[in-house]
Image (tube, rainbow, N blue to C red):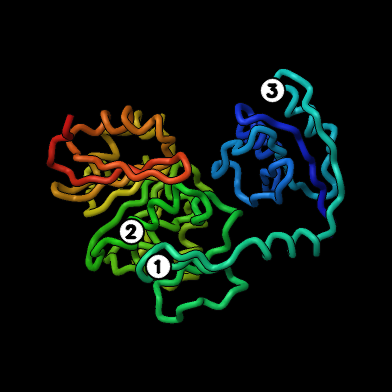
Amino acid sequence: MPWLQIHISASPDNAEFISELLSAADALAVTFRDAGDEPLLQQTQEARGLWSQTQVTGLFDNNADAQAIVNKVELGLGQRPVWHAETLADEDWTRSWMERFTPMHFGGRLWIVPSWHTPPVADAANILLDPGLAFGTGTHASTALCLNWLAEQPLEGKTVIDYGCGSGVLAIAALKLGAADAWGIDNDPLALPVTLENAEKNGVAEHMHAALPEDFPGDQQADVVLANILAEPLQQLANIIAGHVKPGGWLVLAGLLDEQADAVAASYPEFSLEKTSRDGWTRLAGVRGVQQKS
C-alpha cells in the first residue's frame, strides 16, 4: 500500500509545533530532516527542531486529503506553510525505516533490539522494541539518559514506578535488570495497553502493572521513581511524583532542556539531585531525604 508524505518547511522555533499539528491531523508517523541530511525517524515528542532549516514530514494513509491537512496546520500556525506532498511506496518506507535502526547499547548488559535484528548479546538484558513509533524507545537523548542510569543501578528486588510511561520502556528495562515489580503510569489511555503489550513481548508481564494517574493509589511508594516527561508537568506534579518515592529511594527526572534543570530541581527540595547532560538535555537523579545543596 502506498503512503502520502506531506513535507513542511520549519524553523527550530516551530518544528515541534508543526509536528504536533501533523500528529493531531492523524499522521501515522512524523519525521524530521536536515536540509542536507537523511531523516531522523522519531515520533513528535522525541525531536525538537534540531537544525536551522528543518523539514517536518507527516506520513499519512494514501487516501488522506493533503490540502485539508495543510489547512489545519495553517490554522494552528497562523500562516501558510511552505509545503509539498508526494506518494511513497510501502516497500520504500519500510526499507528506509528498518535500515536506520540497529540494536542500541545503554551500558552494562542493557540493550534495545528492534524486532528484525538478532540480539548482539544473547544473555544480555535485551528489550525487544521497535524504535521510532512510540515515545520513549531509546532513540532520544532524554530516554537514553534514563536507560543509562538504570543500567548502572543495583535493581534486584526493587520496586519501580515509571511516571509518564509512554511505551513502558523504562519500566521494562528495570524489570529486565532485576526489579521485582514495576508500575507504568500515563495520562494517555492508549499508552497503557502499549506498555502491557511490550511487557508481554519481553516476558515481564506478570511483574508489570499500568494505570492512569487517577487510578493509581496516591500513597503507593517505590524504591525508584522515574519521570521522563517535560519540565512544566514535572514542576506541576512535583508533590505527587515526589510522594511516590520511599524515604531513601531514588528519583530520576528527565525530558528537560539544560536550561530548565535548575528550575525543576528547585521543585524537589527534599532530594539531592545531580545533573547529567547529553545533546542539550539533562537528567536529574537523587535520593530522597537529603536536602538539596545550594
**In terms of depth relative to the viewer, which is nearer, 185 or 290?**
290
- Circle number at residue 150: 2
| Residue 12 in view | yes
- Residue, disc 3: 77
Q: Is residue 91 above or below residue 85?
A: below
Residue at 61% over, 34% down? 16
Q: For the residue labelled by badge 2, is the local secondary structure a helix, a strand or a loop?
A: helix
What residue is shown at x 84% (from left), y 49% (from top)? 62
The answer to whether 51 is drawn above or below residue 130 in the figure is above
Viewport quadrant of the C terminus: top left
Instruction: Name the residue type under label 3.
Output: Leu
Q: Nearer the viewer, residue 81 or 166?
A: 81
Q: Is residue 140 left or right of residue 37?
A: left
Residue 68 x %, y %: 82, 32
Tell me whether circle 1 and circle 2 mark residues in contact (CB < 8 Å): yes
Where residue 178 sits, quadrant-wise, is: bottom left
SS at mark 1 in the image? strand
* Residue 215 in view (yes/no): no
Q: Please provide percent x and percent y for residue 263.
A: 32, 27
Q: Nearer the viewer, mark 3 or mark 2?
A: 2
- The answer for how far apart the CA atoms under marks 1 and 2 are is 9 Å
What percent of the width, then of the height, locates residue 108?
35, 68
Mark 3 and mark 2 lie on one chain; the one further toward the N terminus is: 3
Q: Residues within 10 Å of mark 3 (few under 14, many from 20)?
A: some
Label 1 sits on residue: 110
Secondary element at tag 3: helix
